[in-house]
Amino acid sequence: MNEARPQSLSSFWMPFTNNRDFKANPRLLVSAEGVYYKDVDGNSVLDGTAGLWCVPCGHRQPKIVAAVSEMVSQLDFAPTFQMGHPAAFDLAEKLMEFTNHRFGHVFYTNSGSEAVDTALKIALAYHKARGEASRTRLIGRERAYHGVGFGGISVGGIAGNRKPYGVMLPGVDHLPHTHNIEKNAYSRGEPEYGTHLADELERIVALHDASTIAAVIVEPVAGSTGVLVPPKGYLKRLRELCTKHGILLIFDEVITGFGRLTTPFATDYFDVEPDMMTTAKGLTNGTIPMGAVFSKKFIHDAFMEAPPGIELFHGYTYTGHPVACAASLATLEVFQEQKLLDRAKEIQPYWEDAVHSLKGLPHVIDIRTIGLVAGIELAPRAGAPGARAFAAFKKAFADGVLIRVTGDIIALSPPLTFERKHIDELFGKIGKVLMTLE
């Protein structure tokens, strides 16, 4: 497979990448099937991250491949401004079914970042449509990741995503994060300590007044910052406070959606209903870029009470792209036919035990698990934060395992098609890597 090597690596400016390090020692993937990648040298690489949290059905699913191929040969593109195509409407109905009809409507985007910015805009426009135009403030959370649009990094709370870009959106405040190793180390599922942190919303309301706040947006489980699981009752308390003060609650389910917690969405797992929900990634099994905002009916209906004309001045050229819709429809069929949620529930305890078996290995200071997600936190090297985990990432890839690292945290999120033998391989190799880290 050496012929697949690119002639040059110089022109592609890679995202979220140490470009100089990568181009000195590139890691090039050329094919994928099931739960494995193949690199440019023909080596198998076990996918411990479902791509980038986005391949719950496993790679190169035949049904999805066939659906994409058929659609692109039939309808390569169709505009959805004052036009439509059947697949976009069919998918919307299927998605409502997949959410157990918790929501009434779906607005398509092309990514999670776009879904977040769309949800924030809908929240602002919703309040204005109802005659509460003073509700312009948006509340995020420290250490949150909500994509890379200016709306997303404004409500987000990861310093590295914000510092290079100067002033963010005005009128944004942040709840504290819930991470506390001292109180909650080595938790399985929701930790005990930290529920009271939801009450910080009351402090923010008292500071700004509820009449100025449009929405609160949180990840039910914070993913990209290193798998931060909410304390017991925390999300329910946020829901209560948002309802009390007339504030919309948005769940960013770009990572937690489509089976990651062994349920369709985190809203099902925690039994907490947001007013809007953002999704992407698993929506198309990562095959074609696509995102979506799920909305309660009352939000949509507020716009429909306006005078005749365009109700929401927002959208994208590729909103509801026919090929993406075909991929998503096929993905939902795979979920049903292969009973992926049942499979995920069945293997989850084995996964959890395997992750926690790493306790006591060198440099491990915490392990967090929920659903088929895990965060393994390492002690940082003195004066070099992130270096130890990045070394683990490179060692693991060389040993045939793909993991994800953020700071000094290893984040794992396998395809839902993982079997026990794959879990054994993954943690056997990660254990060896941890034993060799400096």
Image (cartoon, rainbow, N blue to C red):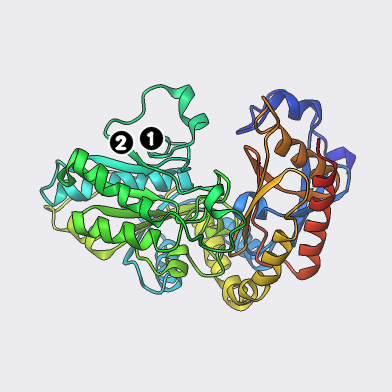
With respect to residue 9, does 353 lie above or below?
below
Residue 64 spot, x, y in % from top left: 63, 64
Q: Which mark is residue 197?
A: none
Residue 335 spot, x, y in % from top left: 58, 71
Front residue (pair 227, 198): 198
Which quarter of the figure is the C terminus placed in?
Answer: top right
Residue 390 spot, x, y in % from top left: 72, 36
Asked whether disc 2 touches disc 1, contact meaning CB atoms under 8 Å apart, the reply is: yes
Left or right placement of residue 308 versus residue 414 in this view: left
With respect to residue 409, does 87 lie above or below?
below
What residue is drawn where x is 46% and y is 71%?
98
* Amino acid of disc 2: Val
Q: Which residue is mark 1?
A: 154
Q: Which residue is mark 2?
A: 172
Front residue (pair 63, 27): 27
Which quarter of the figure is the N terminus placed in?
Answer: top right
Left or right placement of residue 363 versus residue 267 in this view: right
The quarter holding residue 151 reads: top left
Left or right placement of residue 37 versus residue 176 in this view: right
Secondary structure, mark 1, is helix
Front residue (pair 149, 85): 149
What residue is drawn where x is 47% and y is 52%?
291
